[in-house]
Amino acid sequence: MKKKLLALLLSFCMVVSLSACTQNGDAETTTDANGTQTGSASGSGSGSTEPTPYEYVPTGAQLIAGKEYGKDYVSLYDQFGADVKITDVKEDPSTGLPYIEKDGQTYELGLDFLSFAMVYNTECPDFGTEDEVHAEWWKYYIARWNEMMPEIPLYSNEYYDVYNTQIKGVKEHPTNPYWEPAKALTEWTSEKADNSIILGSVTDLTGKFRYSAFGVATPGASDLDIENLTNGLDTVVSTKDGNYTVNNTAVKKLEEVDNEDGSRTYTIEIYDDLKFSDGSPVTAKNYLYRTVAFSTLVSDEATGQEDRAGLTIQGFDKFYAYDGTNAGEEASKVFTGLRLIDDHKFSVTIDASQLPYYYAITYATFTPEYKDLWLGEYDIADDGEGVYITDGFYTKNGDSYAHAAHMVKSSENTDQTYPYSGPYVVESYDSANHQAVLKLNENFKGNYEGKKPTIEKLVYTKIVDTTQLEQLKSGQVDVLCGVTGGASTDEAIKAVNESNGAYDAVHYSRAGYGKLGFRADFGAVQFDEVRQAVAYCMDRAQFAKDFTGGYGGVVHGPYYTGSWQYKAVEKDLQLNAYQSSADTAISILEANGWVYNEKGEPYTEGVRYKKIPAQYVSENDKIVKSIDGAYKSVQIGDDWYMPLVINWFSTSANDFSDLLVTGFKDNENIKKAGFCVQNTVGDWDPMMNERNQRGSTYSGTPMYNAFNFATGFTSAVYDYSYNLSINPAFALYSMFYVCDKADVYLLG
């Protein structure tokens, strides 16, 4: 039987604009999925009577646990999305949340649905232009995100890039949210004796310079900088203002044709004078190596995840399914959507299912890679039907692909074994000190404006917040990238003002924010009300003020106030500011069943528990426990009781982490509401491995469900489709591991 899934709407304090809301701690009442009113008389959580009965509402993660996608359930977007236009969407006037009506039923639109619709459902002339349609979908996405709170934005700050004035051209060619120092330095010069520049970053280098996303869901920012500095000649590139354009320095001609079957073919001709750093020619093949290699089962084994580099391209599914032996109706050795036309021309055909797409120009983005880097002794060819990898690539040793080991080794390469295509090449890398030395690639033709860097040596080094200014003054670093935080910013500005012209700075508002992020499919934080309650317990405005020292503020969703989308819909946004209130947090928790102690008795004090009926409890629910083991899920009868535990993994030597100890972990509101928050401190890689529940340092058993780091919106492409999908095939791309129950459409 088809089943409608409506999320439990909690509207204790919705804001009709971006202004703060008022909380008074009075009695709260909410309505469950069946329309039954429940609530707390006092919001104190100190009663001793049997808790008020309520109907358990399973999380999205619990709804799909043990079920098969396409057989037991699909996403609401897969069920209805292709036929839904923006004019079909209705808006709840009190909350701003969107819904549609289909087959006589009402369906809320979840994060999965909205993230796809805002980039794939933008053609609706009856409403307006594609830009106007995209902005309207964006508004609904932000409203739903704000309701779900898959992570908690804590500060959106000003960035100061402080520099040694021996580096010239910074004022004339400044950084901005879309153009960080690693890109801007192309137009800077150095008056230092050795014509060098030393960039400082608080983020560790890990050595994944060749492909920073290799084996991880979120590449490290510093590794990505090195990758961008050493890779170049892309066919489509980002610009200083965050837009995308064809790179006419590399591309001689780009043609676009819409086909009768709804697909689209881009034919790209590159110039014949492009070279790698060793002087060898860049040909059409080089632009296809990464896409082809990382669309195979071999790369899956190498990275330990499902790689889908060519996901949007016609013929991907069959090519991806090929294991070297199973060519037939379901699998193919040939990637039909990629064609090699000649040494300097190739084409890509985008599958009709991926169109229309708001950011379609990015489908034509390809980066040249040296053959041996990913393919080793093998190559690609095209006999007239599409590109394929030559024989031997899929050879197995036992159950493993022999070539996977080569790809792993290549991902760790930090020297010039394989030449580079970008403005710089890696000369050396010190893994102990997290420092990379780069030198000019004399064969680099130029960026999209034809400009070549002139600074001969670039040193990318690790700095620490507390000593970064000393490192600048002592000459250990020339540019401090993204100085932020109140004390740090004050010290940086003072250092500039007192330097007698030795140092200067440029600054800009950050397109992004620092956050408390969640592994939102594990433990207590899989429940929407828990994430909302955490937001109510924290004083986000005060946290932002304390951290930025007044050089910033706080946002209520995943947006940048300088973006055109925000400016287009700002007056219509209805966002909850989550004004700090322990009483509101308690009311939300009580209304949603966090009313027990560890014995299944009515809650009076300490840590709250929630009863999970036997039919909904998952294996992961059963293993939830605090870091010290003092609080854990317990079975009482057939049901299980889960503790209100948040295990937080934070990075060391970090002002943000330090402030969260008082602003989150030891927050009196958190304790009053009945939370237990415990903390482990470690390095970036181990933290992300625990978040992603994979990687060499992952314990093997889920433990942590909160992490602090940052999010940026530094691209013109605002597209989170696949990042929020409930389809397990795209779990690799998940941003929050949230499963919005409004997106679950049960079949059968």
Image (tube, rainbow, N blue to C red):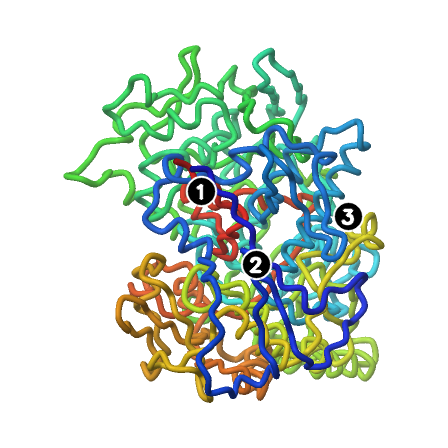
Is residue 259 shown above or below 642? above
Q: Nearer the viewer, residue 450 or 192?
A: 450
Residue 603 sits in which quadrant?
bottom left
Towards the viewer: 495 or 70? 70
Residue 453 vs 490, above or below: the answer is: above
Closer to viewer: mark 2 or mark 1:
2
Horizontal and vertical percent position of residue 529: 55, 67
Label annotation for residue 727: 1
Q: Name the residue located 33 percent from the left edge and 59 percent from the top edge.
A: 618
**Which quadrant is the C terminus positioned in?**
top left
| Residue 7 drawn at (x, y percent) | 56, 54
Q: Which residue is mark 2?
A: 8
Kindly state the secondary structure of the residue where label 3 is placed. Answer: helix
Quarter of the image where one finds residue 612: bottom left
Amino acid carrying label 3: it is Gln
Give the SS element for disc 2: loop
Cα–Cα span, label 2 and label 1: 22 Å
Q: Is residue 223 left or right of residue 244?
A: left
Kindly identify which residue carries mark 3: 565
Nearest-to-viewer mark from 3 and 1: 1
Q: In the rendered view, tell whether residue 274 sits above or below residue 52.
A: above
Residue drawn where x is 52% and y is 60% of the image: 437
* 2 or 3: mark nearer the eye: 2
Look at the numbered discs 2 and 1 and tell me whether their residues touch, using CB distance below 8 Å.
no
Note whether residue 247 is visible: no
